Image (cartoon, rainbow, N blue to C red):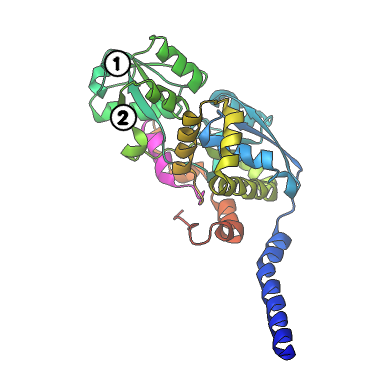
């Protein structure tokens, strides 16, 4: 009897040690950062940006030796800050592509979201895209998601932005929503939480781009190619910490909602839950960059010859593939898959 108890105890100890091996190996394999601080710009707050905000709040970057300072900048300002070196990472949308088209070597190294949550609304009584002919639509900055989606939808219907529909540009989604609510725009195209606010007030949905299956990278992780080449380990740590944030958002909804409420200043419980669910729909666990959303942006660009550029020029998947292999596949077993280059 005593021998059996001893044997069971030894087996239990052995199993516990084996269970700890992946954790030890993972920790030992973690990269050593080339620098201990990163300046990160995000385009807005809201559910699309919740994983990075939560990850920073929870200390997922600092525990690996990198301090993250997050600032909110417009798309244009963020691209300029990246080029000047004032910002190391732009966690945002199409500004990375537009700057590259203009000749700057900015690229995506990961795609945290590439399924659009944009919603196009009309004022009461305006229920179809054709109803917007000769009218105005409030959106965010020039070249951002809203403009890309509007140009695509207009072309599909034989219409033209600037000729048949006027876009009213704003610094951010909150300003666009304000213009629409005051009746100074006939339509509105925004992402959560502003889209949920408009929906809650009963404005008719003309197009829900998530349901339509529109794919645009945003937010993606944009950097200068030279910065990636000089700081690969620091960027891998950033991507690992971000994935930790995604997992915590999914595993701990109460904490995620708390951070979302703090960062977005949302006090309404129903709106908070709806905004959180919008994020759950689109957060990527595999952040490998898909070239198709880049191709879409190039096709809708107003820059001559942009549509003929090779999408591969705009991204480098080498770092996220390493992170997927060494970390993401363990964090999300069976869910992280390598996509084609």
Secondary structure under the numbered disc 1 in the rendered image: loop
Q: Residues within 10 Å of mark 2 (few under 14, many from 20)?
A: some
Q: Is residue 113 above or below residue 266?
A: below
How far across and how far down the image is residue 251, in percent? 56, 49
Tell me where residue 293 sits by quadrant: top left
Residue 236 visible in the current orientation: yes
Does residue 63 sit above or below 158 in this rendering? below
The circle on residue 210 is none
**Residue at 59% in and 52% down:** 319
Q: Residues within 10 Å of mark 1 (few under 14, many from 20)?
A: few
Task: Kindly identify which residue carries mark 2.
Answer: 207
- Locate residue 191, reporting x and y percent: 44, 29
Mark toward the start of the polypeptide (1 vs 2): 1
Quadrant of the image for the N terminus? bottom right
Question: Where is residue 334 drawn, in percent x and y?
Answer: 49, 62
On the image, which quarter does residue 190 sit in?
A: top left
Residue numbers of the magenta segment = 286-303
Disc 2 is placed on an element classified as: strand
Pointer 1: what residue? 124
The residue at 76%/47% (across/down) is: 65
Q: CA distance from mark 1 to mark 2?
A: 15 Å
Is residue 43 placed above or below 186 in the rendered structure?
below
């Amino acid at each position: 009897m005593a021998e059996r108890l001893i044997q069971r105890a030894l087996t239990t100890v052995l199993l516990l040690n084996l269970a700890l091996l992946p954790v030890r190996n993972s920790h030992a394999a973690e990269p050593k950062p080339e620098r201990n601080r990163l300046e990160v710009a995000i385009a807005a707050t809201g559910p699309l940006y919740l994983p990075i905000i939560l990850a920073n709040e929870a200390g997922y970057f600092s525990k690996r030796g990198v301090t993250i300072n997050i600032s909110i900048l417009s798309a244009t300002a963020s691209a300029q800050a990246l080029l000047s070196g004032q910002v190391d990472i732009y966690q945002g949308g199409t500004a990375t592509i537009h700057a590259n088209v203009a000749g700057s070597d900015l690229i995506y190294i990961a795609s945290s979201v590439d399924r659009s949550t944009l919603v196009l609304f009309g004022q009461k009584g305006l229920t179809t895209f054709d109803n917007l002919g000769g009218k105005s639509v409030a959106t965010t900055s020039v070249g951002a998601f809203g403009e890309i989606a509007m140009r695509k939808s207009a072309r599909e219907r034989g219409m033209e932005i600037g000729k048949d529909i006027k876009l009213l540009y704003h610094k951010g989604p909150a300003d666009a929503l304000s213009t629409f609510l005051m009746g100074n725009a006939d339509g509105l195209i925004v992402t959560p939480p502003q889209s949920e606010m408009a929906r809650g007030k009963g404005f008719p949905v003309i197009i829900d781009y998530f349901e339509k299956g529109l794919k645009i990278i945003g937010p993606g992780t944009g950097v200068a190619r030279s910065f990636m080449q000089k700081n690969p380990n620091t960027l891998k740590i950033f991507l690992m910490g971000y994935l930790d944030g995604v997992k915590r958002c999914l595993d701990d909804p109460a904490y995620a909602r708390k951070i979302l409420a703090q960062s977005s200043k949302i006090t309404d419980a129903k709106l908070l839950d709806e905004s959180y669910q919008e994020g759950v729909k689109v957060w990527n666990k595999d952040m490998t960059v898909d070239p198709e959303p880049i191709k879409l942006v190039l096709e809708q660009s107003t820059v001559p010859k942009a549509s003929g550029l090779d999408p591969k020029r705009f991204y480098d998947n080498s770092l996220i593939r390493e992170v997927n292999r060494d970390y993401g596949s363990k964090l999300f077993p069976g869910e992280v898959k390598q996509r084609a280059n």
